[in-house]
C-alpha cells in the first residue's frame, strides 16, 4: 500500500473532532491492512507460562489470524511457530494443549520437533531421492518471543522494539494484577465467536466506563454478583470522580474505579487479598484502592484485574472475532476458594457470562451498523471529555488522568490505530508514536 492510501486510512480518525469513520469497522481492505500493519507488527499475547509448566508442554493459539504453536523447550525457553505444515499447509497439531516430543502432520506424516524443525518425512530416501533439504522446510518461527510477569508474547516483526519497550508504562497496570497474589492460569480455555469487529471489543476494554450503568443494569437488577460484591448500580454509575484513566504509548490503557472498602463483603474469601498488608504494600496507595481495572494490551487483549481474566479477541474478518478466555487464580488459595473464583469469573464473563451477553449484543449491533451505505456517511463520536483531560505526573503512577468516566482511553486507542496504519515500518512508528502527556 502506498503512503497516500495509508494516510487516507489514518485520516478516518479525526484527531480534532474525536470522531471515527465507520468504514474502519467494516471495509475488507482496511481489515487486510490492519492484519499487516498491526497484527504482523505488535507483540501479541500467546499464553501464561503456568499453562506450560513442563518440557514439551504446548498450547495451540493464534497471533492475529495465524495459528501458532507455543512449546516449552528443555532449557525453559519458549518456541513459537506457525501451525501449518510446509507440505500442503495442514495443521500439524489440532489439540488445544498437551505435551509432545514432536508433531506429526496427519495428512502425509511430515514430522517436526518442538522447535518447529522438520525432522522426518515418509519416503525421504525412495520418494524424494534424498533431495529434500530438511533444514529449509521447518515450520516458520515468529521473530521474537519474550515474557512479562509470566505472560508470553511474540511478534512476527524482527524490527519490533523489545517487549519491555512495547509494553512501557502499562507494566505498572499489569503489576496491579500480578501483585495481588501468586496467580496461575486455570487449565482449560473457553472459546467462542461473535459477529463483531475486533475494535469494538478493544475500545470497550480500554475504557468504557460509560456503558456499565445502562448496558449491565438489567443483569445487576436481576441479582448478578461477580463474586465479592463488585457489581452494583453504585459501582457502575458513570461519574468523573472515584477513579482514574491511564493510557500509554503504543495504544495500551485502562480505566480503574476505586472501591469503598467498608462496602466489601468480608465474608467472601475472594476479598482477603484486599486486606493483606503484604499485598497492599506491593500495590501502594493508588493501586490498593482500585476495585477493578478494565485494561487493553493493544491491539486485542482484555485484562481484567477484578475477576482476573485474560480475554483475547482474535480477528477473523471485518465482522467476526473469536474470544478465548483464560482465568487466573491464586495458587496458594484452597481448592474450594479457587473454584469459587472460577465460578465468579464465569458468571461474569465468558459464553454464559451475564455481562458478556450484554456487551456482545451491543458490539454486534455496532458492527452491523458500520456496514450499511447510508449509516457509513455518519461518523461515530468518541469525543467525551476531549480537551478536558490533563495528565498528572506526580510520581504516584505513570502519567494518568484523574477522571474516571471519559473517552480519553478509547479515543487514544484510535489515535494509535491511525499511527500504526500510517507508518510503513516499526522504525517509522517509533519516530511518530505519541507519548500521552499534557492536555488530551
Ligand atoms: S500436508 Fe502435512 S504432510 Fe502433507
Ligand atoms: Fe461491559
Image (cartoon, helix red, strand yellow):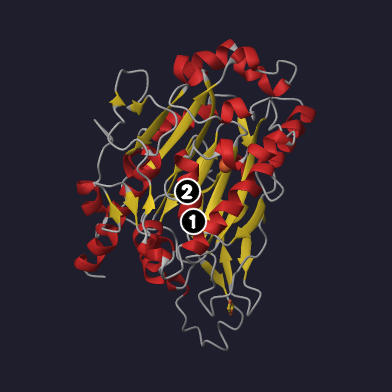
In this rendering, does residue 36 appear at all? yes
Indicate whether 258 appears above or below 203. above
Indicate whether 396 appears above or below 115. above
Q: Nearer the viewer, residue 184 or 261?
A: 261
Q: Which mark is residue 13?
A: none
In this rendering, does residue 69 appear at all? no
Q: Residues within 10 Å of mark 1 (few under 14, many from 20)?
A: many
Location of mark 1 (residue): 198
Location of mark 2 (residue): 202
Q: Residue at x 62, y 29 (%)?
A: 233
Q: Nearer the viewer, residue 396 or 265?
A: 265
Name the image quarter holding residue 244.
top left
Q: Nearer the viewer, residue 81 or 437?
A: 437
Q: Residues within 10 Å of mark 2 (few under 14, many from 20)?
A: many
Q: Is residue 218 left or right of residue 14?
A: right
Q: Residue at x 36, y 64 (%)?
A: 377
Where residue 200 appears, as percent x and y from the top left, is 48, 52
Q: Residue at x 64, y 40 (%)?
A: 327
Where residue 175 appears, as percent x and y from the top left, is 48, 28
Q: Residue at x 31, y 38 (%)?
A: 386
Where residue 2 appears, as percent x and y from the top left, is 22, 69
> For ligand 1, which image quadrant applies?
bottom right
Verify CB contact (< 8 Å) between mark 1 and mark 2: yes
Label 2, ligand 2: CB separation under 8 Å:
no
Indicate whether 302 appears above or below 171. below
Q: In whole angstroms, how far apart are the C-alphas of marks 1 and 2?
A: 6 Å
Query: Which part of the image, by quadrant, shows the C terminus?
Result: top left
Indicate whether 85 appears above or below 389. below
Amino acid at each position: 500500500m502506498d503512503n497516500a492510501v495509508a494516510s487516507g486510512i489514518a485520516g478516518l480518525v479525526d484527531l480534532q473532532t474525536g470522531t471515527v469513520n465507520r468504514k474502519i469497522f467494516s471495509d475488507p481492505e482496511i481489515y487486510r491492512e490492519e492484519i499487516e500493519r498491526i497484527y504482523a507488527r505488535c507483540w501479541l499475547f500467546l499464553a501464561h507460562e503456568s499453562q506450560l509448566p513442563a518440557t514439551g508442554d504446548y498450547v495451540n493459539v493464534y497471533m492475529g489470524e495465524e495459528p501458532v504453536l507455543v512449546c516449552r523447550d528443555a532449557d525453559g525457553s519458549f518456541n513459537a511457530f506457525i501451525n501449518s505444515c510446509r507440505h500442503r499447509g495442514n495443521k500439524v497439531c489440532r489439540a488445544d494443549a498437551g505435551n509432545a516430543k514432536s508433531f506429526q502432520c496427519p495428512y502425509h506424516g511430515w514430522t517436526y520437533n518442538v522447535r518447529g524443525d522438520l525432522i522426518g518425512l515418509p519416503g525421504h530416501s525412495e520418494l524424494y531421492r534424498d533431495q529434500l533439504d530438511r533444514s529449509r522446510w521447518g515450520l516458520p518461527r515468529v521473530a521474537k518471543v519474550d515474557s512479562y510477569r509470566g505472560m508470553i508474547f511474540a511478534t512476527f516483526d524482527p524490527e519490533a522494539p523489545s517487549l519491555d519497550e512495547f509494553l512501557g508504562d502499562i507494566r505498572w497496570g499489569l503489576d496491579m494484577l500480578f501483585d495481588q497474589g501468586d496467580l496461575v492460569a486455570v487449565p482449560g480455555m473457553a472459546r467462542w465467536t461473535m459477529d463483531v469487529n475486533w475494535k469494538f471489543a478493544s475500545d470497550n476494554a480500554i475504557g468504557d466506563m460509560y456503558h456499565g450503568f445502562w448496558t449491565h443494569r438489567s443483569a445487576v437488577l436481576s441479582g448478578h454478583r461477580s463474586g465479592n460484591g463488585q457489581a452494583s448500580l453504585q459501582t457502575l454509575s458513570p461519574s468523573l470522580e472515584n477513579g482514574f484513566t491511564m493510557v500509554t504509548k503504543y495504544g495500551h490503557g485502562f480505566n480503574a474505579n476505586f472501591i469503598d472498602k467498608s462496602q466489601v463483603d468480608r465474608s467472601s474469601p475472594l476479598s482477603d487479598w484486599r486486606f493483606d498488608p503484604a499485598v497492599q504494600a506491593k500495590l501502594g496507595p493508588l493501586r490498593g484502592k482500585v476495585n477493578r481495572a478494565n485494561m487493553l494490551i493493544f491491539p486485542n487483549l482484555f485484562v481484567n484485574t477484578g475477576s482476573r481474566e485474560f480475554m483475547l479477541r482474535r480477528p477473523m474478518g471485518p465482522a467476526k472475532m473469536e474470544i478465548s478466555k483464560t482465568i487466573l487464580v491464586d495458587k496458594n488459595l484452597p481448592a474450594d476458594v479457587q473454584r469459587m473464583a472460577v465460578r465468579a469469573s464465569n458468571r461474569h464473563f465468558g459464553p454464559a457470562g451475564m455481562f458478556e451477553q450484554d456487551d456482545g449484543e451491543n458490539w454486534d449491533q455496532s458492527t452491523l451498523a458500520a456496514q450499511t451505505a447510508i449509516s457509513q456517511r455518519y461518523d461515530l463520536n468518541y469525543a467525551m471529555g476531549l480537551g478536558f483531560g490533563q495528565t498528572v505526573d506526580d510520581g504516584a503512577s505513570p502519567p494518568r488522568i484523574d477522571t474516571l468516566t471519559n473517552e480519553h482511553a478509547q479515543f487514544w486507542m484510535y489515535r494509535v490505530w491511525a499511527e500504526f496504519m500510517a507508518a510503513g515500518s516499526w522504525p517509522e512508528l517509533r519516530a511518530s508514536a505519541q507519548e500521552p502527556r499534557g492536555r488530551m
